[in-house]
Amino acid sequence: MRKVFLALLVLTSLHTRASVENKADSISNVQLEEVVVSATRAGKNTPLSYSNVGKAELKNNNTAQNIPVVLQTLPSLVAITEGGTGVGNTSLRIRGTDATRINVTLNGMPLNNPESQEVYWVNLPDLSSSLQNIQVQRGVGTSTNGSAAFGASMSLKTVGATSSPYGEASTAVGSYGTFSSSIAAGTGVLSNGLALDARYSKVLSDGYIRNGKVDHTNIFASLSHYSDKQLIRLSYINGIQHTGITWNGASPEDIEKYGRKYNSAGMYKDDAGNIRYYDNDTDNYYSNILQLMLSRELTDRLSLNVSLSYTNGYGYYENYRAGSDMIKGDKYSKFGLDNQVVDDVEYKSSQLIRRKLLSNDFYVANFSLNYNMNPLQLVFGGYWSDFDGSHYGRLPWVKYNQNIEENYEWYRNEGVKKEINFFTKAEYQLNNEFSLFGDIQYRYIDYRMTGTDDDMVDLRSNHYYSFMNPKGGVFYRPNNNSEWYASVAVGQREPLRADLKDAVKFGGTKAILPERMIDYELGYRYTNNRGMNLAANFYYMDYNNQMVQTGKLSDSGYKIMENAKDSYRTGIELEAQVPLSPKFIVGANATFSKNIIKDYTAYYDLYSPGYAEYLGQQEEHFDETDISFSPNLVGMASLTYMPIKNMTLNLMGKYVGKQYYDNTSNDDNSLDAYFVSNFVAGYTFDMTSVGSIDLQLVINNIFDKEYIANAWVATDKVNDGTAYVYKGLFPQATRNFMGRVTLRF
């Protein structure tokens, strides 16, 4: 089946009409480009809160950083970066919801890993340079392909063909040894309807914290064929990333002792007791995405989009295991090995190098039919996917080794996930003022695990889920300047692979339940012909069975996720863009929210002093408590000044309020609020005979703020009333610079 799938993908890409009467009409081309993503996006009358980010804005914000950082000016969005600079491992939260609850599509095809339900942006370096636009829908949003959307949906569209040939070369250098270069070219749409676009980019950096190095490569290529009322496009994206491990974090004590750049990854002691560093404590991934898309205007009222996608991924992380004292390492029993005798000495543990690997194949096919006959607009779509993921672990090196084979494999498991969904969306214009919106989606998921986990526990299990997600709303436009909307949407989400693993290890006596949420939205937008834009959106997200970490252990000693029966997020999002003059534009947004779990119980392991004896678990109950990583205030303000033609100066400030990094509302486990300002200056030299030269200067964190954007905590209780508390904090870079030169011709 999979070989047939790939064969069809290749053969279809080669099957184009031998001859074309004329070069495709530019207006028709634009319409066809929109069909590619129309099924997953909100339209102008869709009663939802959303933001559109165009190519110009992407270009201005792109300084070799990953997409979460590029989008940090959007409402309710908080960008997270492990290495402190935004070029390594990064993620985002929207309305406090993490990346596992944010649906992402690329040209209508899912990007989220079906098992973790997250997009690892580090595996797609410099993707923003190959994008034409992005739409971010907050809340449940409209029905889309791939994993469920709870916090938001992100629809990404790659660049389309241009009317004329072009070339581009760009180089950027900055702080912490950061270097970025790219080259791109396109043929434009030729007389035979063909168009070829390609881009190559490279990003290197030492990172802010120790071992925050990156070595990233990205290749993008697109072959398009335009004919009368039809677009066929074959796209390929290759991402190669080598990134130093930065996910350990640093304790407050280590930061005070060693500084904000401290990172324990790869640290060990040699036989003489000297501290050394293993150079290959790295995370590595190789990604290949192949997409084939057909967009066809069947009639003046009906259009069709059909897409096939194949994603192949292979990666591993490698780290040096030295143990808490940086000498003993790990016990052999953790890997199913006997104690080793070397030079007549028996060792129960050893320093070693551990490598955890994964490989996956992801096949996707979807379609959508768009029917437009005023006053009715109708979209019917379907989606099928097949994911096969392997996870395994090896030991490339063991210090005290009697008879352990090289690259000894101590575990291997496989997950196979299949999904089918269908959805129908309808907009009906009642009159000049009112329109109605309806959307219903059906999802079926079949997920099966085999093999053993890294603790050698059998994972064999089957899981099936069936969801029906209705959505509806009303849109009201009383005049040309004002818009009102209201909507109600249901979202449901299956557990992650990690959640299901824990449930299986529990022994099946307590299954983790899917999450369910009802999202209520009420909003207002105002625009005028002077460029003023104002918006306000109220939301209430009512959760049932939200999956949260409580610290509870299974009977066999595994920490498990639990369903919080009742929780909610509610808030108001405000946006404004006001041109003060032809040269000055002020922009701002702010989200004020409350994020609560009701009837929550936290569990702590209880010990006698000095960890002498394990005494079970201690409970702490809360009638209500704040949801972790959900600040009550997130805001942004910007001032754009255009003093002369082709020059733009922008000053932006981002505020993120206090965040708890567990679910206990404990001030000791919270991140201080922070406000960070960035400055961007850009100037374009027009060169009519050759092209143009763009100059860009970026100063991040211009006021040299020392702040922490993310953290983790683990707490054990002692029966004398004290506690053992372990924390990992992620300091962000202080003032840093980036300069870019781009030649376009």
Image: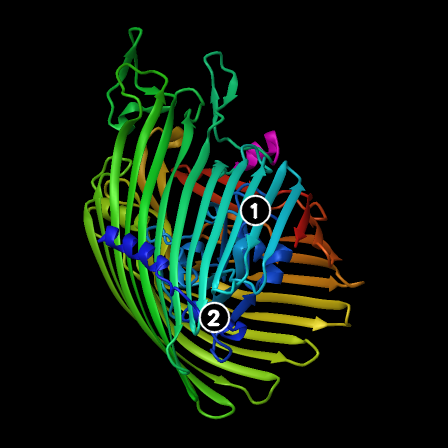
Residue farthest top in this picture:
344
**Which residue was labeled with disc 1?**
86
User: Is residue 359 in sight in this rendering?
Assistant: yes
Disc 2 marks which amino acid? Glu
Residue 41 showing in the rendered view: no
In the shown orientation, is residue 703 left or right of residue 504? right
Left or right of residue 493, residue 239 in this image: right
Q: Which quadrant of the view contains residue 409? A: top left
Q: State the image coordinates of residue 345 (x, y, percent, origin top left).
A: 30, 9
Q: What x and y, as percent, mark residue 204?
A: 57, 38
Q: Does the magenta stretch include residue 254?
A: yes
Relative to 299, say whether 291 is above or below: above
Q: Residue 371 carries which label?
A: none
Quick one: which residue is furthest to the bottom in this view?
431
The residue positioned 76% from the left and 63% from the top of the image is 642
Dot 2 lies on which element?
Answer: helix
Dominant SS of magenta comes to: helix
Q: Is residue 133 left or right of residue 584?
A: left
Judged by depth in the image, the label closer to the viewer, 1 or 2, is: 2
| Among numbered discs 1 and 2, the one appearing first in the sequence | 2
> Residue at the location (53% across, 58% down)?
131
Q: In which quarter of the image is residue 470?
A: bottom left
* Coordinates of residue 511 in the picture (x, y in percent): 23, 54
| Alpha-carbon span between mark 1 and mark 2 | 30 Å
Q: Kindly indicate the quadrant of the structure image that contains residue 301.
A: bottom left
Mark 2 sits on what residue?
A: 34
Instruction: Check disc 1 and give the amino acid type.
Output: Gly
Residues drawn in magenta: 250-260
SS category of the residue bearing label 1: loop
508 over 233 or under it: above or below: above
The residue shown at (46%, 56%) is 222
Q: In the image, is residue 581 part of the stretch drawn in magenta?
A: no
